[in-house]
């Protein structure tokens, strides 16, 4: 029987739940008040846009979006010209937007921790698989495009 792995959107959802819990249980300092907290909509919207653009690129090139599955196409244009992992960056922007919107400091702990979690659970394996699949093309791409920003 094939092992079912937890996918990145599940980690995003859990991160949001933890952020909300931290905000209400341990708000630390209410640092951003209305209307300034509405600035959180900017990174939130940017995160949504990045994820939609990256997802469209996967569909356009008929390759898998799921981690741990072998890609059939190396996407190096669009948002992938700017960042090797725009979906994970989009998730971090979504979380940052939510943290800003909530206005307390404690949710930012999740925003800081989340990229490291994605790095350990997904990115290292994905990049190893890309190198095995695409070889020199991947190494050239990796040398010219940053992992995050």
Image (tube, helix red, strand yellow):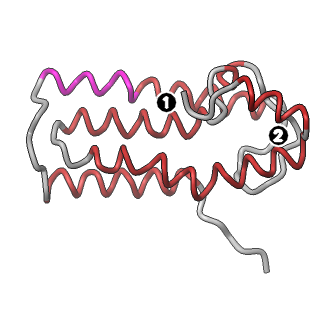
For numbered disc 2, what is the local secondary structure? loop
On the image, the x and y values in percent for residue 101 come to 23, 33
Q: Are marks 2 and 1 in contact (CB under 8 Å)?
A: no
Q: In the image, 77: left or right of 20?
A: right
Label 2 – label 1 distance at C-alpha: 20 Å
Q: How many marks?
A: 2
Image point 18% across, 50% down: which residue? 23
Q: Overall secondary structure of the magenta stretch?
A: helix
Does 123 sit above or below residue 138?
Answer: below
Image point 52% across, 24% down: which residue? 49
> Does the stretch in magenta take in 39?
yes
What segment carries the magenta color?
35-44
Q: Which mark is residue 48?
A: 1
For numbered disc 1, what is the local secondary structure? helix
The numbered mark, 2 or 1, whose residue comes first in the sequence reads 1
Q: Which mark is residue 133?
A: none
Circle 1 packing at 10 Å, graded few (<14), some (14-19), many (20+), is some
On the image, the x and y values in percent for residue 89 come to 52, 35
Does 68 sit above or below residue 33?
Answer: below
Quarter placement of the N terminus: bottom right
Q: In the image, 50: left or right of 23?
A: right
Image point 28% across, 43% down: which residue? 108
On the image, the x and y values in percent for residue 131 come to 84, 45
Image point 78% across, 45% down: which residue? 64
- Quadrant position of residue 112: top left
Q: Which mark is residue 63?
A: 2
On the image, the x and y values in percent for residue 90 come to 51, 34
Q: In the image, 124: left or right of 47?
A: right
Q: Nearer the viewer, residue 49 or 147?
A: 147
């Amino acid at each position: 029987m094939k092992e079912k792995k937890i996918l990145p959107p599940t980690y995003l959802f859990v991160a949001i739940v933890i952020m909300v819990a931290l905000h209400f249980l341990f708000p630390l300092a209410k640092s951003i008040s209305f209307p300034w907290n509405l600035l959180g909509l900017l990174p939130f919207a940017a995160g949504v846009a990045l994820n939609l653009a990256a997802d469209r690129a996967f569909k356009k090139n008929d390759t898998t979006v799921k981690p741990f599955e072998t890609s059939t196409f190396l996407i190096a244009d669009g948002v992938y010209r700017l960042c090797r992992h725009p979906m994970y960056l989009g998730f971090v922007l979504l979380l940052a937007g939510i943290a800003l919107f909530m206005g307390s400091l404690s949710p930012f702990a999740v925003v800081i921790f989340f990229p490291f979690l994605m790095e350990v659970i997904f990115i290292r394996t994905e990049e190893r698989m890309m190198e095995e699949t695409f070889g020199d093309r991947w190494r050239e791409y990796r040398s010219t495009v940053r992992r995050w920003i």
